[in-house]
Amino acid sequence: MTNYNFSDSVIALAAISQAIYCVKDISRKGQTDPVDMEIMIESLLKTDADSTEEIYKNHKYLTTGLRFLVEQLSGPRTDAEFSRYLVNILSLQKRFSNDANMQKVMGSRVAQAKRLYEYQEKIDQDLIEQLAHIYKDTISTYPTKIQVSGNSQYLQQSANQAKIRALLLSAIRAAVLWHQVGGKKRHFLLSKNKIIETAKAYLA
């Protein structure tokens, strides 16, 4: 276990927040910012980055997530839906981090997806579908389920379902990072103001 790295933990939290924001967007409006989504999808395929920030290219690509995080932590009350997503994502991360067999399966499946990405040099619906299947075959098999609420008109479209699953996989990836840099649930209570300040400094 690495020592607690505050800046890295805020980057990872911003990434989780950005994935949640994109999921909420797609489930309600049928679309989300393509760059915000692409950064999250690409993060799944970056398995050898030198730093937490490098997984997302640069913290500027997490502006939506940083803003959403600040909004959720500093507002008069947190959006209940955001809290529900976050609690379930962290619970699934814990389960996954203790499951060596599932990590092995995930690792080899992500390596396949990475080969496809390197071959075609772009993120398209085929790649998103492949990542969605990884989520379905791994994280989705755990008892904790992430219930996605929104407009059924959009949720019933298979392309949107695939995007949502791929984004949830990216949220779990970010939660694993958060855990690796020493993130703990108690930090939301004990270090809330410091998280907000750090996120605002990244936004400045």
Image (cartoon, rainbow, N blue to C red):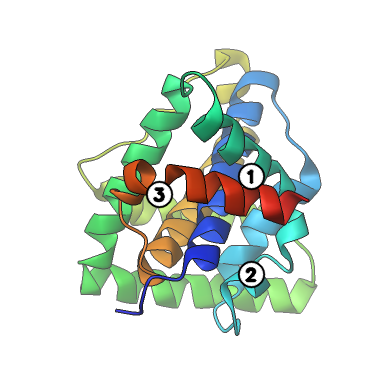
On screen, residue 157 above or below 190? above
Give the Cα separation between the discs numbered 2 and 1. 13 Å
* Amino acid residing under circle 2: Glu
Q: How crowded is mark 1: few (under 14 residues within 10 Å), some or many (20 or more)?
A: many
* Amino acid residing under circle 1: Gly
Q: Where is residue 154 in the image (x, y as percent from the top left)?
A: 63, 21
Question: Counting residues from the N terminus, which is met first, the one under dot 3 or under dot 1?
Answer: 1
Quarter of the image where the N terminus is located: bottom left
The answer to which quarter of the image holds residue 70 is top right
Q: How crowded is mark 2: few (under 14 residues within 10 Å), some or many (20 or more)?
A: some
Q: What element carries label 3?
A: loop
Viewer-proximal residue, 164 or 129?
Answer: 164
Q: Nearer the viewer, mark 3 or mark 1?
A: 3
* Amino acid residing under circle 3: Ser
Q: Name the residue under label 1.
A: 65
Q: Is mark 2 on a helix, strand or loop?
A: helix
Q: Mark 2 points at which residue?
A: 53
Q: Residues within 10 Å of mark 3 (few under 14, many from 20)?
A: few
Viewer-proximal residue, 11 or 188?
Answer: 188
Question: Counting residues from the N terminus, which is met first, the one under dot 2 or under dot 1?
Answer: 2
Give the Cα separation between the discs numbered 3 and 1. 18 Å
Residue at 40% from the left image edge and 39% from the top image edge: 86
Q: What element carries label 1?
A: helix
Residue at 61% from the left image edge and 44% from the top image edge: 18
Q: Tell me the number on the disc at residue 191.
A: 3
Q: Where is residue 88 in the image (x, y as percent from the top left)?
A: 32, 39
Q: Where is residue 180 in the image (x, y as percent from the top left)?
A: 38, 71
Asked if marks 3 and 1 touch (Cβ < 8 Å), the reply is no
On screen, residue 119 above or below 154? below
* Left or right of 193, for residue 120: right
